[in-house]
């Protein structure tokens, strides 16, 4: 599990209520931890499809005739399942966010701990990297993503500083960016603020919230009648979208009601919000912000 220590492993798979002959999808394969547990619970007739756009994850492919790894972004889940002859499934698992492997590889540029190129692309074939955003986005656009995705109140000042500094020299690495922004990084809050800045840039690079919305919108048409959705999120922006879609089937506004006051939400939640135990957080500190929500089709 050195590639990625799966978070809320048993809770998230329990949430899928695995049927031995069922068809399941793990849309965030990574190190394969969750996929292996699903396969452990499937019988010979079961099937598991997994998605991962990161070429590094392909090295973790599981040698099992019940398993198919699709090297694509899970925003295209319906399209690629149809390609494999599948229209409806019994369960879908999503473990959102960045894998431990991506954080720990300095050259990927995800981590504030290492000196590395400002990359942050989950899909290495993608044209837009963090370097492009930092060095080419307008001050207004930078401020917008820092405010929306990093929830930084001083986003305008940070954006202004980046734009001013890049006129003198292109900002190429994580430590260069850290140096440029040192006036905004008081010792007591340095890690927290840098994490917010990196999160905002990473979300923009990978279009993470757009991908999540596109994925969630496909769920009602993909699940069988008693099918389950199990989603682990790591920050409030993701969790809000997941929670709201499960509750209303929308990302903003409220569902329309008929003349009898009934609305037609496609999903309903199963159980309560689940968070990691203190023991799990002690073993894997990256689990500390995880939230698991489970849903099924509304009858």
Image: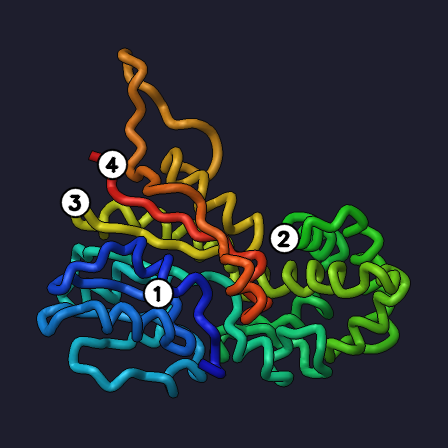
- Sooner in the amino-acid sequence: mark 1 or mark 4: 1
Query: Do the CB atoms of the residues marked 1 and 4 lie less than 8 Å apart?
Result: no
Residue under pointer 4: 298
- Sooner in the amino-acid sequence: mark 1 or mark 2: 1
- Give left or right: position of 287 versus 292: right
Q: Which of the 4 image quadrants contains residue 142? A: bottom right
- Give left or right: position of 206 versus 94: right
- Sooner in the amino-acid sequence: mark 2 or mark 4: 2
- Sooner in the amino-acid sequence: mark 1 or mark 3: 1
The local crowd at label 3, few if under 14, some if 14 to 19, many if 20 or more residues have their Cα within 10 Å, is some
Residue under pointer 1: 27
- Give left or right: position of 171 versus 253: right
Q: Which of the 4 image quadrants contains residue 18? A: bottom left
Extreme residue toward the left, this view: 45
The local crowd at label 4, few if under 14, some if 14 to 19, many if 20 or more residues have their Cα within 10 Å, is some
Residue under pointer 2: 149
The local crowd at label 2, few if under 14, some if 14 to 19, many if 20 or more residues have their Cα within 10 Å, is many
Quadrant holding the C terminus? top left
Q: What element carries label 1?
A: loop
Extreme residue toward the right, this view: 183
Extreme residue toward the front, this view: 279
């Amino acid at each position: 599990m050195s590639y990625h220590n799966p978070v809320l492993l048993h809770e998230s798979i329990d949430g899928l209520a695995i049927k031995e002959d069922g068809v399941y999808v793990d849309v965030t394969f990574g190190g394969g931890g969750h996929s292996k547990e699903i396969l452990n619970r499937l019988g010979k007739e079961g099937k598991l499809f997994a998605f991962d756009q990161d070429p590094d994850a392909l090295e973790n492919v599981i040698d099992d005739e019940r398993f198919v790894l699709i090297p694509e972004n899970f925003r295209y889940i319906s399209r690629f399942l149809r390609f494999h002859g599948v229209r409806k499934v019994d369960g879908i698992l999503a473990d959102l966010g960045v894998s431990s492997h991506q954080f720990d590889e300095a050259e990927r540029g995800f981590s504030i701990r290492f000196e590395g190129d400002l990359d942050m692309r989950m899909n290495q074939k993608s044209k837009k990297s963090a370097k492009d955003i930092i060095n080419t986005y307008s001050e207004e656009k930078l401020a917008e993503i820092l405010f929306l995705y990093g929830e930084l109140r001083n986003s305008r000042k940070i954006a202004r500083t980046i734009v001013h500094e890049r006129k003198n020299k292109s900002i190429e690495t994580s430590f260069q960016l850290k140096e440029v922004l040192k006036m905004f990084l008081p010792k007591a809050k340095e890690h927290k603020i840098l994490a917010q800045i990196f999160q905002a840039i990473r979300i923009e690079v990978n279009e993470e919230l757009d991908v999540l919305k596109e994925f969630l919108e496909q769920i009602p048409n993909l699940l069988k009648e008693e099918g389950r959705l199990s989603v682990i999120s790591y920050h409030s922006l993701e969790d809000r979208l997941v929670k709201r879609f499960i509750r209303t089937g929308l990302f903003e506004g409220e569902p329309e009601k008929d003349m009898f006051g009934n609305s037609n939400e496609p999903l309903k939640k199963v159980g309560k919000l689940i968070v990691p135990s203190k023991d799990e957080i002690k073993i894997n500190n990256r689990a500390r912000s995880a939230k698991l929500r489970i849903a099924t089709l509304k009858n």
